[in-house]
Amino acid sequence: MLECGRHLEAALAALGAGTEHDLSKLPRLRTKTKHVSTPSFDVRAALFGVLGVDLTQIHGMGPSLLLKLVGECCTDLRAWPSVKHFTSWLCLAPGNKISPSHTCKHV
């Protein structure tokens, strides 16, 4: 696991090498829960250095899930113009369509 963590850290460092994202602008940590499968390095800071945004600010998005996301979608997040678009694509945003059979009727 430590070997994998070192490879992940090196890969993220290589991805972020050409970027100029200021780590001092990294938002305050939203939760302090340590996930079991999180690598030994600071994944949140490494991903911020690559992406320029802290996706862990989205409820339900932890470091391990974000590593998978970057692995699947790469680092170009321009396909989602806003956080709302991104969370909707992830199916984290609840649907707002309510069929007539689900509305309350007072008798």
Image: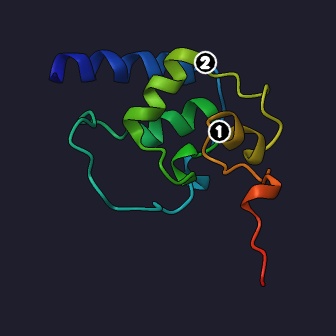
Q: In which quadrant of the rendered image does the C terminus lie?
A: bottom right
Compute the Cα span from label 2 to label 1: 15 Å
Residue 84, given in percent of the width and then of the height, sits at: 76, 47
Left of 105 or right of it: where is 57?
Answer: left
Of callouts 2 and 1, the N-terminal one: 1
Whether 7 is drawn above or below 35: the answer is above
Tell me if mark 2 has few (under 14), some (14-19) or many (20+) residues whose alpha carbon lies within 10 angstroms of its own.
few
From the image, state whether disc 2 or disc 1 is nearer to you: 2
User: Which corner quadrant holds the N terminus?
Assistant: top left
Q: Quadrant of residue 87?
A: top right
Q: How many badges with numbers are in the image?
A: 2
Residue located beneath label 2 in the image: 73
Front one among 1 and 23: 1
**In front of the other: 47 or 17:** 47
Residue 104, above or below 27: below
The numbered dot on residue 38 is none
Residue located 58% across and 29% down the image: 50
In the drawing, does residue 66 fall left or right of residue 99? left
Circles 2, 1 touching at the beta carbon (< 8 Å): no
Q: Position of residue 77 (x, y in %)?
A: 71, 28
Residue 51 place in picture, x, y as percent: 62, 32
- Image location (x, y in percent) of residue 100: 82, 57
Q: What residue sits right under mark 1 in the picture?
A: 52
Residue situated furthest bottom in the rendering: 107
Q: Amino acid at mark 1?
A: Gly
- Secondary element at tag 2: helix
Direction from residue 22 to residue 97 in the image, left or right: right
Give the residue displayed 51% in from the left and 48% down from the top. 56
